[in-house]
Amino acid sequence: MGEANVPAGLGFQKTFRFTELVYRKPGITHEQFIDHYVNVHIPLAVETGRKYNVIHYSVQFTGQKQREKAQELFGKGFSNFLDCDAITTIAFTDEASAIAATKDPDWMGKVVADCVHFIKDDGVQLTTGWEYVANKDGVTVC
């Protein structure tokens, strides 16, 4: 996959990242979705990810309350909010590790298989690419 041409001397921390917009399965509440994600799915993903140089895994839960808070922060004139229930990011040290993870039977048999319990069919929009980190933990790294 293509990488940005970064001028010499800029020392970004670079990771290969999956970003997913996740939509909950019809018939389960937002609270049930969060409970399953936190207590079942994340532990499966973290366990499998350890084998493949995952250096960051996070889930940002969204929903009606969060959209209302965003509207409060950004004003009534801004209305183009994501309608997903969660945004998941998984960062690998390199692209080869990400590819290897997706080919692991544990990834498909445990992590992906668990999705049917709380994510709607076709309920994940996914993108991949290189992330260039300019500030980490409050420290400029480039």
Image: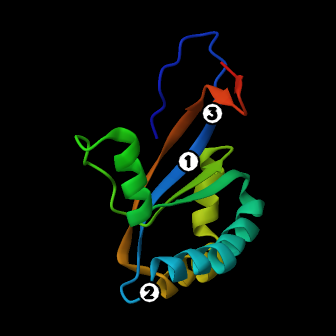
Q: Which residue does the numbered mark 1 point to in the structure image?
A: 17
Please state which of the two labelled residues, at mark 2 or mark 3, is closer to the viewer.
2
Residue 101 against residue 90 in the figure, above or below: below
Q: Residue 28: which disc?
A: 2
Amino acid type, mark 2: Ile
Quadrant of res 57: bottom right
From the image, which quarter does the C terminus lie in? Answer: top right
Q: Say which residue appears at 55% left-offset and 37% top-offset.
A: 131
Q: Say which residue appears at 40% left-offset and 42% top-offset.
A: 73
- Along the line of sight, the residue nearer the viewer: 137 or 91: 137
- Along the line of sight, the residue nearer the viewer: 63 or 24: 63
Q: Which residue does the numbered mark 3 point to in the structure image?
A: 14
Could you give the CA–CA distance between mark 1 and mark 3, rounded to whole angstroms? 9 Å
Mark 1 residue crowding within 10 angstroms, few (<14) / some (14–19) / many (20+): many
- Residue contact between numbered discs 2 and 3, judged by CB atoms under 8 Å: no
Q: Is residue 135 left or right of residue 50?
A: left
